[in-house]
């Protein structure tokens, strides 16, 4: 009822096409949602979640099959491919404070989690932290907004102040995979190890490219005794 009243007073428009939003409490219309490039549920690497078109079942990709490049986390899932209308919406959410898109995005991330992981086994949900500079510059942590909403959906504990960033790594954009791993090495610490010891954790981020940052964060958590780390991101930047 409240949503209907609010829609009458302040009609919502679709984030992508600008037409009236026809989905209660959401900000993308049905037509645009139907065109969103969702990551397929089938044909994904069982560790990093990388999808291969036309492949059935799970597989182990080349990177995850080598000990030198296998990520530290135990599994990863992404909701959408970072392209088309999804790219615009994610970009506006991340950089232009379009935080009203959170519920749309949480719908997609919840579906990805339930399809990929045993959510009943998750003990707590953590966001990827920002560097101090990015937090001051942006004014908010976009991953924390998603992680809070997802924790509520999954009825799991939210740990927003446990994983911390340290040091001053350069931007990951433009770096190759090896350089990304080197750039983020040692940039995470765990503020309260006792709350992650022996736990299965769900680590939330906005966009995954190579997975180097998620892997380094997972390393810090596992060094403090975490048993299993699953990662979920809103979008996946597709590599060749």
Image (tube, rainbow, N blue to C red):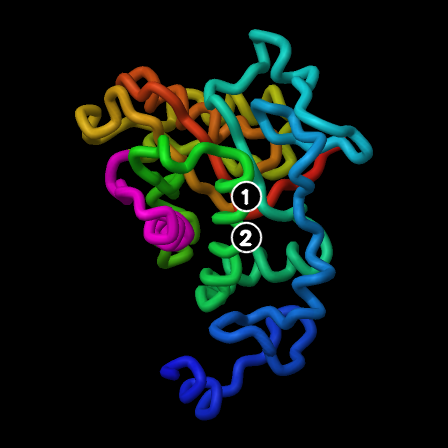
Quick one: 24 or 36, which is closer to the camera?
Answer: 24
- Is 234 rendered above or below residue 53? below
Quick one: 183 or 97, which is closer to the camera?
Answer: 97
* Magenta residue check for 237: no
Q: Find residue 115 and report its horizontal and vertical position in percent.
A: 55, 39
169 left or right, relative to 82 = left
Q: Badge 1: few (under 14), some or many (20 or more) residues near its Cα, within 10 Å? A: many
Regarding residue 52, the answer to whether it shows in the image is: yes
Q: Residue at x 55, y 71 (%)?
A: 27
* SS under mark 2: helix
Give the number of the disc on residue 63.
none
Q: Find residue 150 and report its horizontal and vertical position in percent.
A: 40, 50
Quick one: 147 or 69, which is closer to the camera?
Answer: 147
- Is 31 rendered above or below residue 93? below
Range of residues picked out in magenta = 144-162
Q: Residue at x 54, y 43 (%)?
A: 112
Regarding residue 141, the answer to whether it shows in the image is: no
- Is 184 rendered above or below residue 206? above
The residue singled out by tag 1 in the image is 112
* Magenta residue check for 147: yes
For the residues bearing labels 1 and 2, Cβ distance under 8 angstroms: yes
| Residue 156 sits in quarter | top left
Q: Residue at x 36, y 58 (%)?
A: 139
Image quarter (top left, top right, bottom left or bottom right) of the N terminus: bottom left
The residue singled out by tag 2 in the image is 108
């Amino acid at each position: 009822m409240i949503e209907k009243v609010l829609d009458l007073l302040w009609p919502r428009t679709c984030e992508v096409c600008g037409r009236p939003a026809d989905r209660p409490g959401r900000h993308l219309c049905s037509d645009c949602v139907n065109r969103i490039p969702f990551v397929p549920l089938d044909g994904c690497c069982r560790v990093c979640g990388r999808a291969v078109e036309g492949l059935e079942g799970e597989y182990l990709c080349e990177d995850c099959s080598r000990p030198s490049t296998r990520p530290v986390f135990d599994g990863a899932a992404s909701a959408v491919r970072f392209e088309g209308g999804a790219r615009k919406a994610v970009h506006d959410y991340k950089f232009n404070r379009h935080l009203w898109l959170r519920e749309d995005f949480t719908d997609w991330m919840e579906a990805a989690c339930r399809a990929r992981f045993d959510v009943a086994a998750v003990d707590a949900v953590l966001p990827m932290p920002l560097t101090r500079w990015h937090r001051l510059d942006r004014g908010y942590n976009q991953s924390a907004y998603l992680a809070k909403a997802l924790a509520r959906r999954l009825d799991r504990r939210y740990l927003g102040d446990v994983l911390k960033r340290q040091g001053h790594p350069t931007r990951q954009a433009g770096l190759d995979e090896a350089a990304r791993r080197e750039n983020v090495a040692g940039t995470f610490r765990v503020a309260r190890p006792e709350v992650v010891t022996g736990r299965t954790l769900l680590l939330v981020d906005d966009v995954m490219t190579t997975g180097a940052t998620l892997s380094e964060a997972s390393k810090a958590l596992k060094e403090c005794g975490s048993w299993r780390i699953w990662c979920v991101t809103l979008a996946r930047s597709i590599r060749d």
